[in-house]
């Protein structure tokens, strides 16, 4: 699978939407760095990086069909959009199946404990938190329990730790990361968080 070609295909699909392109590149960069720090095997690393490039590919289709998007709609619509792009990038049927599974579950935080899945969740959650301007909710250096800050509820807090991994590189996140979701400002199914 040619990841450089896949990145061009995805950028072409998202042409005219620089916010989405910037988002996927940030998620891709974090997935690449964390996957390497965790020592993922080459095949798993390539699938993780491909999934990072296409993880939100269902947004435009959701907006076209339903007039909005949210996590469940992205998961529903994403694989059908990702599949032909992955084929054009030379992915094997097995790679496509694995990558589309990641796309179809990247907002279902309890779907798997596999390391590539947890890394994709972690990277997407961190980028979304930054892009949505969430305040730093928790920085645990001393092992103390999580506490809410301001009006940010504890249930959306991620547990950040300063623990070294085997090679001494600190990537700053404890596995498994299980953010329980960011509540929408309105109470309908139309999330105000477009990337969730």
Image: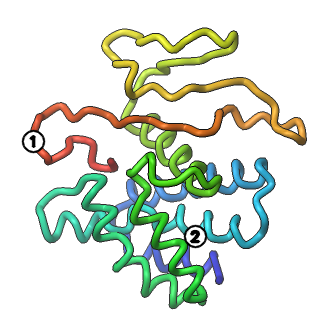
Residue located at (62% from left, 16% from top): 140
Q: Position of residue 127 (x, y in %)?
A: 49, 43
The answer to whether residue 8 is left or right of residue 162 is: left
184 is higher (above) or lower (below) than 74? above
Q: Is residue 171 above or below residue 148?
A: below
99 is higher (above) or lower (below) than 161: below
Judged by depth in the image, the label closer to the viewer, 1 or 2, is 1
Q: Position of residue 114 (x, y in %)?
A: 61, 55
> Which is more toward the observer, 21 or 54?
54
Left or right of 165: which side holds 154?
Answer: left
Q: Earlier in the sequence, mark 1 or mark 2?
A: 2
The disc label shown at residue 166, or none: none
Q: Which sits in the foreground, 155 or 169? A: 155
Q: Residue at x 48, y 80 (%)?
A: 9
Left or right: residue 169 versus residue 188 is right
Q: Residue 150's image quarter? A: top left
The reply, left or right, for residue 105 in relation to residue 70 is right
| Crowd class of label 1 (few under 14; some 14 to 19; many from 20; radius 10 Å) | few
**Viewer-proximal residue, 64 or 174?**
174
Closer to the camera in the image, 93 or 139? 93
Where is residue 136? Give x, y as percent: 49, 21
Q: Circle 1 is placed at which residue position?
A: 188
**Place of residue 175 in the rendered image (x, y in percent of width and height, measured from the top left):** 63, 38
Structural distance between the alpha carbons of marks 1 and 2: 32 Å
Tag shown at residue 50: 2
């Amino acid at each position: 699978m040619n990841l450089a070609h896949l990145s061009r295909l995805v950028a072409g699909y998202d042409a005219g939407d620089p916010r989405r392109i910037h988002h996927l590149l940030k998620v891709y960069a974090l997935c690449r760095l964390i996957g390497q720090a965790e020592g993922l095997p080459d095949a798993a690393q390539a699938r993780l990086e491909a999934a990072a490039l296409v993880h939100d590919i269902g947004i435009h289709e959701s907006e076209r069909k339903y007039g909005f998007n949210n996590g469940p709609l992205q998961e529903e619509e994403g694989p059908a959009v990702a599949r032909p792009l992955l084929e054009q990038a030379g992915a094997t049927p097995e790679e496509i199946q694995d990558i589309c599974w990641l796309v179809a579950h990247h907002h279902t935080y309890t779907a798997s404990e596999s390391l590539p899945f947890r890394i994709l969740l972690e990277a997407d959650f961190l980028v979304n938190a930054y892009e949505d301007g969430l305040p730093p909710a928790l920085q645990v250096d001393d092992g103390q329990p999580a506490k809410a800050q301001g009006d940010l509820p504890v249930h959306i807090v991620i547990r950040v730790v300063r623990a070294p991994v085997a090679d001494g590189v600190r990537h700053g996140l404890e596995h498994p990361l299980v953010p329980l979701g960011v509540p929408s400002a309105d109470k309908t199914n139309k999330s105000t968080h477009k990337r969730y």
